[in-house]
Image (cartoon, coloured by chain):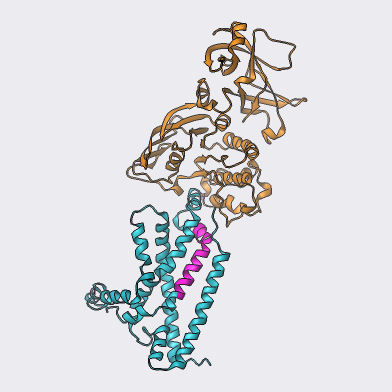
Amino acid sequence: MSSALLQISANMQRGDFTLDVHASWPLTGVTALFGRSGCGKTTLLRIIAGLEKLSDAQVTFAGATWQNNRQFVPVEKRRVGLVFQEASLLPHLSVTGNLLYGYQRTPDALRRLQPDAVIRMLGLETLLERRVDQLSGGQAQRVALGRALLSSPQLLLLDEPLAALDTQTKRDIMPFLSRLASESAVPIVLITHSPEEVQRLADRVVFMRDGAIDEICDLQQAMARPDSPLFADEGPATVLNGVLSDTDEQGVRSFGVEHAWLFVHTSSSEVGQQPSPMTNTRLRVLARDVSVALDDPERISIRNHLQVVIQQIHELPDNRLLLTTRLADGQHLLIEITRWSSRQLGLQTGQTVWALIKSVALVR
Amino acid sequence: MFELGQTEWQAIWLTVRLCFFTTVILLIIATPLAWWLSSGRSRWRVAVQAIVALPLVLPPTVLGFYLLMALGPRGFIGGSLESVGLTHLAFSFEGILMASVLYSMPFAVQPLLESFNSLGRRPIEVSASLGANAIDRFFSVILPLCKGGFIVAATLSFAHTVGEFGVILMLGGSIPGETKVLSVLIYDYTESMNYEAAHQLSFLLLAFSFFVLFVVYSINRHFQVTKI
């Protein structure tokens, strides 16, 4: 699928804001546009959608020209699903009316998602007959996601879909977004300024700053740099990909690929009603939640011990060190310890040690 | 008290026809115009808005004078019509219809502009992204969400055309069945000191206008254009 790319180049000057973007990325998984407010993420998204008609812009979607000097495919012909910060439901239609608005306008042959499946995926069963002004913010946003999906889009564009929601609602919606990302098979472009959302949802990160793209890399690379902008909120962290097994009698599920098993406590709400075992799940481990031991400690409450090889030792402020280590399956794990404990243990690159993981979060 | 003769009925029927066609034409013209004004990108916007609002401040005689010049046999429009074998438009129903459209334009544009402004672009962007083309968007989103604006625009255009006098007198004169609308007939009756007949029609218009404004203001309150 190397040919399926989204290619954009755009040049724009509006007031003292300049947008100058030349980029392309594969049309698979979730691509996060990450950057501060005002860096041009939304403008870029609107150019992709066809809502912004710049004179100097080219957009190519999987080889098809959406915009260049000579032609401009209008929004309604691009088949992109749009979800904004505000749910933007059509107030004169019911929930069902909103959900089916795009579905009814999608030719039979192009319909890939059916209402029943989408309603189930987003947990909308009980909302269908409601008027849209009777929905909470989170419910409305789920309807907006469903409505976009039911137009069977070739590309889903999400402009900070969680930013206007409170923390609890965010937490409620996140699993639905994760399911959408892994189950819908629609490439997604997600605008966000939240490192957590990137770590949970993205497969690839487009770093934007001052109207330009700094770097495009996949999530693992983006999180390999000790000074990654994705560590701004909660400090360095690692995202591990793997297969999650069934829950055992004690409510514990094992996770990982060969040689690197982790044990995960899950509450049912955290995973929604996903089938198990789940492939392609994602665990997030904060670097400060990992300790180092030279031997495998046996009499200890921490259950997750992994043998890792130290690859790099990086200095952090305040006498702390960040260790980049490699697991048996090749994935990286970041560990944050103090300079003092490193000296005590005599840690060096190339050394094999045990990583003791105090807590992990199942994020997708 | 009300004894309407043939002259009166002819004038009423003519007035209703004039108002009806004016309203229909205005809705067709004012909708895209108000939409364009509300999108607010062009630098011509302010100039166009000022031109649309001109009839609000100009004496009707000024508008009537220029229209008479333009639509008459030697005018730019009237003359062109004559040269292709048609008749000029001064002192004709078509002439006063054209005048009414211009004269009532602000009353159609303003309510539509307001309701388009408060609607915003978002619902349109959403429906476009869901596959609705421009016509579909108009009927499935703009019309239902700006229903109040359309009703107010139509009612005001109709009512304001009923109240037109100066322009018609300048451009149309007082030809029964062609340009002698109610307001002109009232003027004629008063001129000839037939106060009884003038009073009858005046009262009719007074009651009608009150009713229309009453309806408009209650719609305005109930039909606040929904913003999403």
* In this view, B199 is above or below A37: below
Give how far across and how far down residue B106 sits, in percent.
41, 67
Q: Is residue B71 visible?
A: yes
Q: Is residue A87 magenta?
A: no
Q: Nearer the viewer, residue A302 or A65?
A: A302
Q: Please identify the residue farthest to the right as the structure is shown.
A: A249
Answer whether residue B148 is magenta in the image.
Answer: yes
Q: Residue at x 38, y 74 (%)?
A: B100
Q: Colour of chain A?
A: orange
- Measured from the top left, where is residue A353 in percent x and y? 62, 9
Q: Residue furthest front?
A: A318
Q: Residue sitting at 50 percent across and 20 percent down?
A: A225
Q: Quadrant of residue A184?
A: top right
**Residue at (50% x, 64% y) in the render:** B149
Left or right side of A122 for B90: left
Q: Nearer the viewer, residue A347 or A131?
A: A347
Q: Nearer the viewer, residue A257 or B20?
A: B20
Question: With respect to residue B12, does B224 lie above or below?
Answer: above
- Residue A220 in the image: above or below residue A177: above
Magenta span: helix, strand or loop, mainly? helix
Residue A133 position within the rendered picture, expressed as x and y whole percent measured from the top left: 62, 53
Q: Is A293 drawn above or below residue A274 in the view shown?
A: above
Which percent across, then down, holds residue B55?
A: 37, 70
Left or right relative to A246: residue A282: left
Q: Is residue B94 left or right of residue A250?
A: left
Q: Is residue B93 visible?
A: no
Q: Residue placed at 64% from the left, 36% from the top?
A: A171
Range of magenta residues = B139-159
Q: Colour of chain B?
A: cyan
Choose top left, top right, bottom left or bottom right for residue A283. Answer: top right
Q: Quadrant of the C terminus of chain A?
A: top right
